[in-house]
Amino acid sequence: MKAAFVTEPYHVEIQDIPCPACRPQEVLIQVKNAGVCGSDLHLFRGTHAFRNPPAILGHEVAGTIVEVGADVSKFKVGDRVTVEPQIGCGQCEFCRNGMVNHCIHKIVPGTDQWLGTFAEYFVAPESVLYPLADSVSFEMGTLIEPLAVAVHAMHQLSGVSKDSILILGAGTIGLLCLTVAKQMGYKTVICTDTAPFNRKSAEKLGAIALDPSKVDVPNEVKRINGGGVDAALIAAGAGNILDQASASVKKRGEICMVAMVTEKIPFYSYSVVLNEQRLVGAMTYSSEHFAMAANMINNGLDLTMFVTQKIDLSQTQEALQMLSEKKGDIIKILMTFSE
């Protein structure tokens, strides 16, 4: 089969490798679509914490089962599925409580233990499979994984008040958080982004959009929603992003950080203390929240506008360069595979 390998930083090769074999509790999936995630850039750039070249990219996937292991009982050949791309040890306190995302022994795609999804075929255990409704396209099935990130982030907020929320950053995850916020009943959603396309996308989804390079975000938020917002969600990594969030949120409000900011940034923490604000992080998703995202898509949530580019596996290098250099109007790039 063909697979896209990062062989060294900034270099992708399409290689022919043996098709993976199923173990008794696994299935073999013919990949129909695979999503290009911002985290794939870390591997592409050689800066990922644990994925190191050479490695196959990708963890967002939808496809058709073409082979099942001897012990598989809930799925059969021909079933259309997506995959929760994390396998926990099953024994630690986090796994026992459904929080596989915090298992220190978890296995994820793009590593020696589990090949990535930028390949014609992908093996996964039955335990992490989710069926796709007949009405759901493979494209929408692939978006279940990033939607799960947004579902988990939004559920990190207590939701005591769903009157107003500020989403800082209207890229893929920010816009998905906006979608989930609307589904959860937030009445006023304000998004910020410096890219005009991202702001227009946010407006299409029902948000008020601000350009942080042209307005004082906290002042404008307070003008729009007197006194500030109930919550802020950080989906971007600008140096002043935490200060913007805290200054925009009301007393006793909440801030959730889903952006993976790997560089040190300044933060005026006294504001959090003075206003008794709650600051919490969001790391990928729990199995419960992945299941919620799958149900949302299977029950008709349409994220068609999120798919802005579709490319062939052979164009993986170009896709990653496009995303890395922010060339063009991009929300989600999907890899497509010929029959």
Image (cartoon, rainbow, N blue to C red):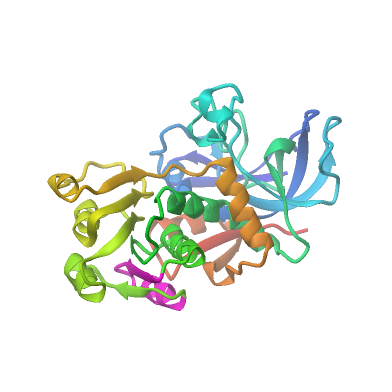
Q: Which residues are magenta?
A: 187-204
Among the 4 quarters of the image, the one containing residue 208: bottom left
User: Is 216 on the left-hand or right-hand side of 80?
Assistant: left
In the image, residue 35 sits, relative to residue 100, either above or below, namely: below
Is 338 left, or right, of 55 in this rendering? Answer: right
Q: Quadrant of residue 204?
A: bottom left
Q: Nearer the viewer, residue 26 or 294?
A: 294
Q: Residue furthest front?
A: 160
Quadrant of image for the C terminus: bottom right
Residue at image coords 41%, 72%: 202
Q: Is residue 201 magenta?
A: yes
The foreground one among 71 and 92 is 92
For the point 43% across and 76% down, which residue is it? 206
* Front-lying residue, 295 or 174: 295
Say if residue 60 shows up in the picture: no
Q: Position of residue 289 (x, y in %)?
A: 56, 48
Question: Taking 248 as reference, is 209 above or below it?
Answer: below
Q: From this viewpoint, is residue 11 visible?
A: yes
| Residue 120 x, y percent position in the rendering | 71, 48
